[in-house]
């Protein structure tokens, strides 16, 4: 056996003095340096007794060490569980418990809060700070810079990513080595990535886009990353002259377009701009081409499936579409009720099948069976159609989901908190258009008869329970919610009613 994910994304760079990470302070970490760091971390994890298949939960700021932790997990056959740095202790407790993580790696600032939680759940705890300090690297420093790669099969699990559900409880998407490897190698080929590529990396590495697309594709091609702590417009503009490519969510592109410093000159040398994780407005695509001459390449993916479709590298990158199914990926449009495949051109539910599709949700066989058919097709919950030229269009969602700045927000999670507040009869959380984030969160609350709930206290309760990016931008008190004859809340009516609330 071997370890295909580690061998073909990381191991292929053994001994290479080629640059891998360009840091903001001018430092360059070579492929070999990076592999040495990963091996040292793998030695620490192995020494603490972690075994193949154990889960490593990591809520750490973006850093070379944080990325090396991911590589260490791959090399040691451990399942990497990256967690949004915005998650609260309450949210983290769920992820640590549900995943059965053997160790929690966190920033020293949250150690006091997380240590008792980890202990109670039988998990160890190590710290890793944004500057690379902390107990993890203190131990790693004393370790050998080599590690005997653990045998893993392509069908073995490599990562868990939690993606909330419309029922409110997050589900651990189980991603195999081959899910990640097949997609990375396909995308590197489709998007013509080579060792000469220098990708502007301004995405977080706790989600699919920044970790399994931006990083894995660059690793598969042997290129390097301008590794930025987060998206900062000034820094992106400063470093663009040294880059060849950028991957981002639509907010990256609307912010670039909002700045006069983003000119044709500063971008003319760039080879490729990729957008995904949320809809890219056709007008943004058009404005971008007018400004720079570049046509953004839009692609469509999910945590559960990695990337499904892409506009062509050569060929017409059509605004408002997500291009064609990737090689090896089958995509069909089905009737949401019967599951029957619909004729070309009809709008229905997007289903996908291929090596990119996950194994299911950790310890949730019913939720897995509800979305992953026996025949391997995954029901995405997205609504779309295939046009006469074969381009896939995403036209909506058959799942209650808000995407704000590329982050998924599930209304149910917020409604559960609001409904729990004094004097609240019920609530409805919707997404409404927002010029910067694409969509933003609006909370509508119905009071118990004769009660007048304290909206400020309600917002405080939300702040305590949920990550900042999930917080409603505003709470509105109404007398009642619109319902259809079946008694189902008609969120579409609410969305229409409040669609101009945060318009630019
Ligand atoms: C930050 N904030 C957000 C937010 N990002 N609020 C709502 N939605 C977001 N996306 C909060 C901040 O904490 C801050 O709170 C306030 O909003 C203003 O922040 P900001 O400075 O305007 O935001 P910024 O830090 O610049 O971040 C915006 C962003 C970031 C777009 C750069 O959200 C981002 O990097 N998004 C990428 C998410 C991602 O990687 N998605 C991929 C999912 S994988 P306060 O209280 O401090 O004012 C996937 C599959 C696929 O979808 O297809 O790829
Ligand atoms: P996540 O679960 O965070 O991976 O988000 C996946 C969801 O993001 C998909 O189900 C889509 O709803 C949405 N998405 C991803 N890429 C695109 C895109 N290019 N256009 C529209 N929606 C997208």
Image (spheres, rainbow, N blue to C red):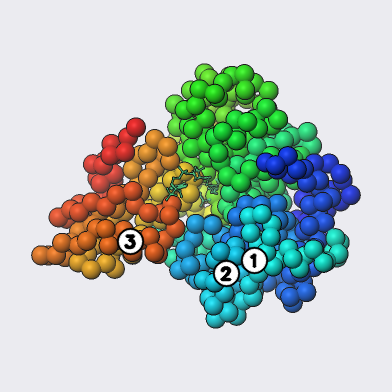
In the picture, the disc for residue 305 is: none
Out of 208 and 315, give the one closest to the viewer. 208
If you read the primary sequence from the N terminus, does the residue marked by circle 1 or circle 3 appear first?
Answer: 1
Q: What element carries label 1?
A: strand
Which residue is the site of mark 2? 111
Distance from disc 1 to disc 3, alpha carbons, whole Å, reads 29 Å
Q: What element carries label 2?
A: helix
Q: Position of residue 428 (x, y in %)?
A: 28, 55
Residue 425 in view of the camera: no
| Left or right of residue 491: residue 320 | right
In the picture, the disc for residue 127 is: 1
Q: Is mark 3 on a helix, strand or loop?
A: helix
Distance from disc 2 to disc 3, alpha carbons, whole Å, reads 23 Å
Distance from disc 2 to disc 1, alpha carbons, whole Å, reads 7 Å
Q: Quadrant of the C terminus?
A: top left
Relative to 233, say whether 270 is above or below: above
Cβ(mark 1) to ligand 1 < 8 Å?
no
Q: Are dots 2 and 1 in contact, CB under 8 Å?
A: yes
Out of 341 and 100, give the one closest to the viewer. 100
Instruction: Give the image quarter of residue 464.
Output: bottom left
| Left or right of residue 125: residue 444 | left
Residue 88 in view of the camera: yes
Which residue is the site of mark 3? 460
Residue at 48% across, 67% down = 89
């Amino acid at each position: 056996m071997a370890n295909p994910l580690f061998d073909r994304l990381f191991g292929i760079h053994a001994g290479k003095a080629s640059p891998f990470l360009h840091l903001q302070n001018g430092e360059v970490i070579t492929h070999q340096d990076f592999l040495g760091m990963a091996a040292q971390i793998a030695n620490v994890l192995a020494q603490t007794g972690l075994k193949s298949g154990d889960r490593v939960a990591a809520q750490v700021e973006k850093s070379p060490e944080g990325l090396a932790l991911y590589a260490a997990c791959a090399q040691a056959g451990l399942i990497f569980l990256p967690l949004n740095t915005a998650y609260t202790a309450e949210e983290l407790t769920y992820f640590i418990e549900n995943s059965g993580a053997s160790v929690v790696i966190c920033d020293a600032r949250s150690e006091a809060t997380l240590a008792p939680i980890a202990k109670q759940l039988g998990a160890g705890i190590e710290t890793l700070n944004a500057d690379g300090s902390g107990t993890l690297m203190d131990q790693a420093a004393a370790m050998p810079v080599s590690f005997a790669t653990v045998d893993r099969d392509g069908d073995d699990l490599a990562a868990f990513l939690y993606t909330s559900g419309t029922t409110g409880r997050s589900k651990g998407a189980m991603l195999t080595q081959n899910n990640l490897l097949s997609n990375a190698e396909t995308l590197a080929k489709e998007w013509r990535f080579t060792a000469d590529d220098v990708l502007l990396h301004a995405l977080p590495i706790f989600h699919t886009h920044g970790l399994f697309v931006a990083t894995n594709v660059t690793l598969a091609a042997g290129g390097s990353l301008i590794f930025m702590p987060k998206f900062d417009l000034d820094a992106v503009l400063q470093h663009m002259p040294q880059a060849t490519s950028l991957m981002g969510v639509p907010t990256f592109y609307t912010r670039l377009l909002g700045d006069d410093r983003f000119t044709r000159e500063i971008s003319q040398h760039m080879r490729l701009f990729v957008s995904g994780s949320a809809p890219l407005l056709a007008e943004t695509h058009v404005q971008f081409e007018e400004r720079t001459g570049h046509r953004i390449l839009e692609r469509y993916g999910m945590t559960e499936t990695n990337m499904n479709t892409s506009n062509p590298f050569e060929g017409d990158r059509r605004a408002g579409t997500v291009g064609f199914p990737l090689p090896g990926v089958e995509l069909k449009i089905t009737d949401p009720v019967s599951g029957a495949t619909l004729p070309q051109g009809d709008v229905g539910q997007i289903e996908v099948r291929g090596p990119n599709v996950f194994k299911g949700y950790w310890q949730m066989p019913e939720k897995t069976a509800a979305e992953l058919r026996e025949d391997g097709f995954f029901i995405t919950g997205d609504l779309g159609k295939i046009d006469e030229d074969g381009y896939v269009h995403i036209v909506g969602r058959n799942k209650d989901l808000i995407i704000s700045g590329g982050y998924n927000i599930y209304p149910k999670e917020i409604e559960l908190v609001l409904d729990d507040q004094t004097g609240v009869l019920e609530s409805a959380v919707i997404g409404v258009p927002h010029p910067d984030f694409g969509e933003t969160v609006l909370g509508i609350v119905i009071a118990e008869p004769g009660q007048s709930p304290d909206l400020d206290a309600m917002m405080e309760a939300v702040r305590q329970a949920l990550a900042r990016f999930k917080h409603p931008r505003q709470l509105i008190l109404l007398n009642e919610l619109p319902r259809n004859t079946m008694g189902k809340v008609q969120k579409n009516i609410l969305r229409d009613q409040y669609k101009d609330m945060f318009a630019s």
